[in-house]
Image (tube, grey):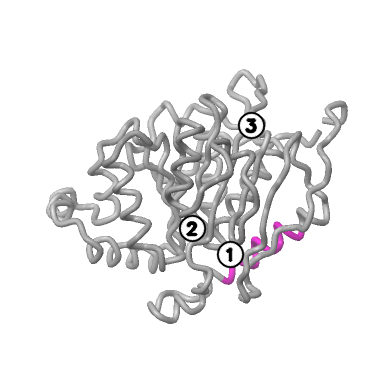
Amino acid sequence: MTEPTFVENYPAQFQWLHHPFSDQFETRFLFMSPSVQRSLEVLNYAVSSDQWVVVTGEAGVGKTTLMRAFGADVVDRSLSVYFFDSHESERGRLWQWLFSDDDEKSDELLSELDATNIRQPLLQRINLCGDCVLIWDHFPTASKTAKSDLILLREQTIDIPMFHIFVVPDDVEQGALLYEELAGFKLPSDDMTSALNRPGVLRCHVDAMTADETEQYASFRLAIAGWQRRPDITRGAWQEIYGLSEGRPQDIHQHMNKIMQSVAEKKTTLINSQLVHRVLSSEDSSIPVMPDSVPPAIDPDER
């Protein structure tokens, strides 16, 4: 078995919306097994191919841990990751992050929330930082306010492919329903892991392994599902329209092409799981292509 990568602490660039770094996070250790690394590759692919993502799994399987690992994994690649935790933040903090670092000014904007308020500060942030990934952890699927906020974000940023949201609901069934609502079509069952292929949709079902400070490994299943919002708008065309910085998307595409080529060549395996995917129906050759097949699972004796 490949030796896990040991990551001590989390990079300072990984920005937390609910509070700055605290001892709770600074003292946590993260071990990354090959299957966790594969999950990160799928999340990176989703970003590079303009997809929004829903990550779901049973309680305690490690969804938050994976999201933190993703944040630590991308900080060096022209990506800006923001972590919003519904368990530890009031609703207004999400909009304060979007609008301004000035709380007083944010409160004023919050009272007049509309499309113009959302788009302009987001475009400015993207111009400075490149792709923005907002991770919304512990998403409260029962909250109508939270759902309306998320749908508003989706509607007003649907033509901005450098802005992504990773939604992490606590409940598996509600996560599937949320995915249906956001993606605009129904899954064949309430279990995301049994979903069928659809054009422009990426899904990955992963048995990932993490370990805490005691180095006791735990195996779990989690599902990652994403969809491309606007396959008719390429990143190049979007950049030309808005006149934003050039070079970053191409760099990311090149990076992801290398990852996917490596996956195909090394026949990276998902342990006891299956990758279901559909290549995006875009003519933009810069969008990386997922491998056509996934090798069989590793024999448990070979781990």
SS at badge 2? strand
Callout 2: 10 Å neighbours few (<14), some, many (20+)?
A: many
Query: For the stretch drawn in magenta, what is the main secondary structure?
Result: helix
Residue 283 is situated, as x and y percent measured from the top left of the image, at 63, 76
Q: At label 1, which amino acid type do we have?
A: Ile
Q: At label 3, which amino acid type do we have?
A: Arg
Between 90 and 193, the residue placed more toward the observer is: 193
Q: How many marks?
A: 3
Q: Over which residues does the magenta segment extend?
A: 250-261
Q: Which residue is mark 3?
A: 221
**Quarter containing the C terminus:** top right
Which residue is at 43% across, 45% downward? 135
**Quarter containing the N terminus:** top right
Residue 59 is situated, as x and y percent measured from the top left of the image, at 51, 25
Q: Which residue is mark 1?
A: 252
Residue 297 is situated, as x and y percent measured from the top left of the image, at 81, 38
Between 181 and 31, the residue placed more toward the observer is: 181
What is the CA distance from the residue labelled 2 to the residue labelled 3? 27 Å
Between 103 and 235, the residue placed more toward the observer is: 235
What is the CA distance from the residue labelled 2 to the residue labelled 1? 9 Å
Q: Is residue 251 magenta?
A: yes
Q: Earlier in the sequence, mark 3 or mark 1?
A: 3
Which numbered dot is residue 79? Answer: 2
SS at badge 1? helix
User: Disc 2 vs disc 1: Cβ atoms closer than 8 Å?
Assistant: yes
